[in-house]
Each structure stands twice: as structure tokens, then as C-alpha cells.
Image (cartoon, rainbow, N blue to C red):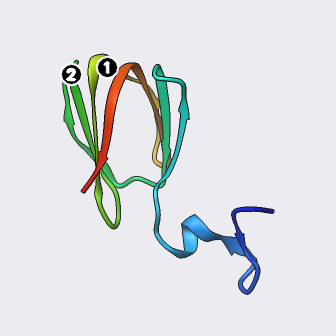
Amino acid sequence: MFNVDNEHDLPRDVLNHECLCQMTGRSEITLENYKCVKTITDTEIEVICKKYKIHITGANLLIKYYNNESMVVGGCINEISFF
């Protein structure tokens, strides 16, 4: 499998404490392995991960779904920044 570390036989995102991001066009992004949400407005959402922050800007942004491990952000996504 592409995301599996051959030496440890574990997913690389788990080994490296990385957030997994999957986009569907400009309208939806799925984030996995995040710690918490810092800011939520209709134009920006800031998510704290273990190693960095993810800042999503756009219009009509909302969190469609979330649980302890993953969330789905919807709306018109203009920019995603990592810092």
C-alpha cells in the first residue's frame, strides 16, 4: 500500500504525526489526525495539528462533520495554508 511504511508496517501519517488531507474540488476537504479547531467563521477555519496549523480560507465555510479523528469542511475553498 502507498501510505504504509515498509519497515514498520504502519501508515506513514501515524508514524510521522501528520495530518491527512483529502480535497474534493474546491468545495470540500477532509482532515484526519488533527488535534483541535482553533477558529471557525464563514470565511476561515483554523485547525491545530500535532506539527503545524492548517488555515483554510474561502466563502460559506462550515464543518459538515467531525469526530475525534476526522472532519469534513465544506464551502467555497479559496486557499489552504500550512504554518
Q: Nearer the viewer, residue 25 or 64?
A: 25
For the residue carrying disc 1, how many other residues have a C-alpha within 10 Å: few (<14), some (14-19), or many (20+)?
A: many
The quadrant of the rendering that contains the N terminus is bottom right
Question: In the picture provided, is 80 more to the left or to the right than 33?
Answer: left
Q: Nearer the viewer, residue 14 or 66?
A: 14
Question: In the picture provided, is 71 more to the left or to the right than 80?
Answer: right
Secondary structure under badge 2? Answer: loop
Considering every residue shown, the one lying at the far right of the view is 1
For the residue carrying disc 2, how many other residues have a C-alpha within 10 Å: few (<14), some (14-19), or many (20+)?
A: some
- As measured in the structure, the alpha-carbon distance from the residue carrying label 2 to the one carrying label 1 is 6 Å
Q: Which mark is residue 6?
A: none
Residue with the mark numbered 2? 43
From this view, report whether residue 77 is shown above or below residue 56. above
From this view, report whether residue 71 is shown above or below residue 59. below
Q: Tell me the kind of residue under disc 2.
A: Thr
Please give the name of the residue rendered at 34% of the width and 20% of the height, measured from the top-left corner: 62
From this view, report whether residue 6 is shown above or below residue 31. below
Where residue 52 sits, quadrant-wise, is bottom left
Considering every residue shown, the one lying at the far bottom of the view is 7
- Residue 39 percent across, percent down from the top left: 18, 37
Q: Tell me the kind of residue under disc 1.
A: Leu
Please give the name of the residue rendered at 56% of the width and 65% of the height, measured from the top-left corner: 13
From this view, report whether residue 32 is shown above or below residue 83. above
Residue with the mark numbered 1? 61
- Residue 9 percent across, percent down from the top left: 75, 77
- The earlier-in-sequence mark between 2 and 1 is 2
Is disc 2 in contact with disc 1, using a CB cutoff of under 8 Å? Answer: yes
Secondary structure under badge 1? Answer: strand
- Residue 27 percent across, percent down from the top left: 47, 19
